[in-house]
Image: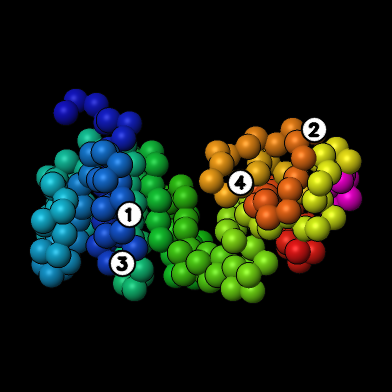
Amino acid sequence: MDKPHTDSVVVIGLGRFGSGVASALATLGHDVLAIDVSAENVQALSATLGHVVQADSTDIETLKQLGVTEFKHAVVGIGQNLEASVLTILNLSQLGLKDIWAKANNAQHGRIAERVGAHHVVYPEADMGQRVAHLVTGKMIDFIQFEDDFAIAKTRAPSETHGKALKDSAVRTRHHVTVVGIKRRHEDFIYAREDTVVRAGDLLIVAGPTRAIEKFAARV
């Protein structure tokens, strides 16, 4: 191909994280090239991925021969071997890839990844641990935290909101969170408005500062 496709992704490192990303991307219909130095990992995915190759990503010439520069995005899922992770990211950066995502096991790994060319760094173990910590008490049904201390959560409607329109319960003014929508059993998603009335048993989708979300969910 002459130009990178916007949905083309090369995934390097096919452990649990990398293989999960590669498989999900392929399911969504993206053009995926998966690379790993381990023949065992490659074999495990050969039946489900169209393009999976055993190769050493620390060798920039090998990446050139595989046509990595034809891909729009790259995901480096190498976690345990810091040297291999850093060299792979550096190679991708030198080859001119403009959107490099890297898995990091800790903050130091993440800082190094950014310095050698990663545009985005993810911490899957830490992020999942934090998410589970918010869900395990049952106060939240789902929780996603973004940068800058902002979060979106699904939680049960507290009794103080039952039978009231959102403008009357003043959730945003009193609790500093915004009700984005409401999900009711066997009903379609409801986009929240000021005159939307909350019922007992409703699930609220709320957004706002993480600490405010936590306090609001604790009121259930």
Name the mark nearer the viewer: 3 or 4. 4
The residue at which mark 1 appears reads as 21
Q: Secondary structure at mark 3?
A: helix
Place residue 153 in its image quadrant: bottom right
Which residue corresponds to mark 4?
183
Q: Is residue 101 above or below residue 217?
A: above
Where does label 3 land, which residue? 16
* Residue ID at (24%, 26%): 3
SS at mark 1 in the image: helix
Find the magenta span and give its range.
Answer: 169-175
- Amino acid tagged 2: Asp
Which mark is first along the chain, 4 or 2? 4
Q: Amino acid at mark 1?
A: Val
User: Residue 156's x, y, as percent?
Assistant: 68, 58
- x then y, percent, for residue 216: 78, 59
Between 120 and 188, the one nearer to me in the picture: 188
The amino acid pointed to by label 4 is Lys
Magenta stretch: residue 60 in it? no
SS of the residue under disc 4: strand
Q: Position of residue 214 (x, y in %)?
A: 73, 63
Q: Nearer the viewer, mark 2 or mark 3?
A: 2
**Splitting the image into 4 quarters, where does residue 172 fall?**
top right
- Name the front one of labels 2 and 1: 2
Q: Which residue is mark 2?
A: 195
The answer to which of marks 2 and 1 sits earlier in the sequence is 1
User: Is residue 153 visible in the rendered structure shown here?
Assistant: no
